[in-house]
């Protein structure tokens, strides 16, 4: 199992593969009894990567990248997994080293024994300590502190290390509320439902289109659009279709939704979910949301734009491996172009929702301010930031209305 974990982490950390896609594709290579622990170690190592590196780096002058990954995944287990004996973690790491780089086995053994025996001291500076504790880079901690204050910055940072439940939504067109809640794999927490079974993709509720995995904040964005039966809606950046299908269910599958994505393989994901959920009002198509062909005018438009993803790092911890300050400025023109392009296809009196899964005012509030300055025929109706915490991801949404021409 740990050889599989090591290969997974090398693929994600060193080769740039996406953690959720890698796990989905390769998890069945493991025995079912090992899948939960393997997933926990992969995600836990990624969530705490800076901290795990700091545990072993004092004892190493230089290390090959793959051996660095091995040290980090082992340090995570030594520090965070009490149920796994330290000797077993170290022995497994040494065995992996023997297969990967035989001459390094003794080195791996020596370093990990030092990590296991010595107490780690956090930096005295509170921002540096928070960065290390959460494995969020210093520059992002400082950005959050400047934009939202120290308390929110700490909340956002520590949320990236949370182990979040699997939230699901009920398809009201396929199953009643009572029947859904009576299923042994569904647990209600407040107004939300979480999945507590094993192997969701093989569960009949999922296969028969009675439920879909969706974070509560993501579902709130779908509701924020205000879809109603008979509406004509554009979902400009729709794949994989989770928000699209949520809107279709709210419309009782009555109306029309054009669901766009730039890539054909991602459009197929929307089509697949439409078939699973038995939804006919959604019309997926390959199209660049920055340059929409003449599709006519819409009652409602959702621009769930590409973003840095700072609000969903608990579920997508590989984002931490690729975080760079310049990533923010690179994405801003794309977001602006999508919003401007889509706005031209909204009816007078219609509603446009701009949303992201990031916590960053440059991508959120500033984009809305810039758009409104350039488009006097639009006004802001509502705007909300959902900050991530130990139970939920983080999102931003703004609802705009096109003022009817006189």
Image (cartoon, helix red, strand yellow):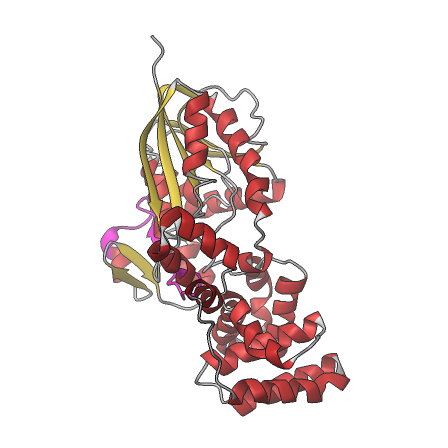
Q: In the rendered view, would you say 152 is above or below 48?
A: above
Quick one: which residue is furthest to the front in this view?
A: 124
Expressed as whole percent of the image width and height from the top left, the position of residue 91 reads 61, 89
Expressed as whole percent of the image width and height from the top left, the position of residue 323 reads 57, 54
234 to the left or right of 66: left
Q: In the rendered view, would you say 201 is above or below 346?
A: below
Residue 276, visible in the rendered structure = yes
8 to the left or right of 154: right
Q: Which quarter of the image is occupied by the N terminus?
A: bottom right
Which residue is found at the position 61% from the left and 76% from the top?
57
Q: Which quarter of the image is occupied by the C terminus?
A: top left
Expressed as whole percent of the image width and height from the top left, the position of residue 257 reads 44, 31
Q: Nearer the viewer, residue 350 or 324?
A: 324
Expressed as whole percent of the image width and height from the top left, the position of residue 78 reads 51, 83
Which residue is found at the position 72% from the left and 73% from the top?
64
Quick one: which residue is furthest to the top in this view?
A: 406
181 to the left or right of 32: left
> Residue 272 in magenta?
no
Q: How many marks on residues?
A: 0
Residue 302, visible in the rendered structure = no
* Magenta-highlighted residues: 159-178
400 to the left or right of 323: left
Please name the predominant secondary structure of the magenta segment in the image. loop
Question: Which image quadrant is residue 356 in?
Answer: top left
Q: Nearer the viewer, residue 356 or 374?
A: 374
Q: Nearer the viewer, residue 199 or 208?
A: 199
Q: In the rendered view, would you say 182 is above or below 387?
A: below
């Amino acid at each position: 199992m740990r050889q599989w974990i090591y290969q997974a982490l090398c693929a994600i950390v060193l080769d740039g593969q996406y953690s959720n896609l890698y796990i989905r594709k390769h998890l069945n290579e493991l025995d079912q009894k090992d899948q939960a622990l393997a997933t926990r170690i992969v995600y836990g190592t990624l969530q705490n990567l800076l901290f795990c590196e700091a545990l072993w780096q004092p004892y190493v002058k230089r290390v090959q990248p793959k051996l660095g990954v091995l040290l980090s995944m082992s340090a995570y287990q030594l520090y965070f997994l009490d149920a796994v004996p330290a000797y077993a973690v170290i022995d497994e790491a040494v065995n992996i080293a023997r297969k990967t780089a035989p001459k390094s086995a003794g080195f791996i053994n020596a370093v990990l024994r030092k990590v296991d025996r010595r107490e780690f001291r956090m930096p005295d500076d509170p921002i540096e300590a928070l960065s290390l504790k959460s494995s969020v880079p210093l520059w992002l901690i400082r950005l959050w502190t400047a934009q939202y204050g120290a308390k929110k910055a700490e909340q956002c940072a520590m949320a990236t290390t949370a182990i979040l439940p699997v939230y699901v939504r009920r398809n009201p067109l396929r199953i009643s509320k009572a029947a859904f809640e009576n299923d042994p794999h569904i647990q209600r927490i407040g107004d939300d439902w979480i999945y507590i079974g094993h192997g969701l993709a093989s569960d009949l509720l999922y296969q028969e289109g009675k439920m879909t995995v969706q974070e509560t904040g993501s579902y709130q964005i779908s509701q924020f659009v205000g879809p109603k039966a008979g509406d004509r809606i554009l979902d400009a950046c729709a794949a994989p279709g989770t928000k699209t299908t949520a809107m279709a269910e709210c419309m009782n599958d009555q109306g029309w939704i054009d669901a766009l994505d730039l890539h054909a393989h991602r459009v197929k994901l929307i089509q697949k979910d439409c078939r699973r959920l038995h939804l006919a009002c959604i019309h997926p198509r390959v199209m660049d949301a920055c340059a929409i062909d003449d599709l006519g005018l819409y009652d409602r438009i959702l621009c769930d734009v590409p973003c840095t993803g700072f609000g969903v790092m608990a579920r997508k911890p590989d984002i931490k491996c690729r975080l760079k300050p310049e990533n923010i400025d690179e994405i801003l023109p794309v977001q602006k172009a999508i919003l401007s392009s889509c706005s031209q296809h909204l009816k007078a009196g219609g509603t446009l929702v701009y949303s992201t899964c990031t916590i960053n005012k440059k991508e959120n509030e500033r984009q809305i301010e810039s758009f409104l300055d350039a488009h006097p025929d639009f006004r802001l109706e509502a705007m909300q930031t959902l900050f991530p915490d130990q139970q939920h991801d983080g999102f931003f949404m703004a609802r705009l209305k096109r003022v009817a021409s006189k």
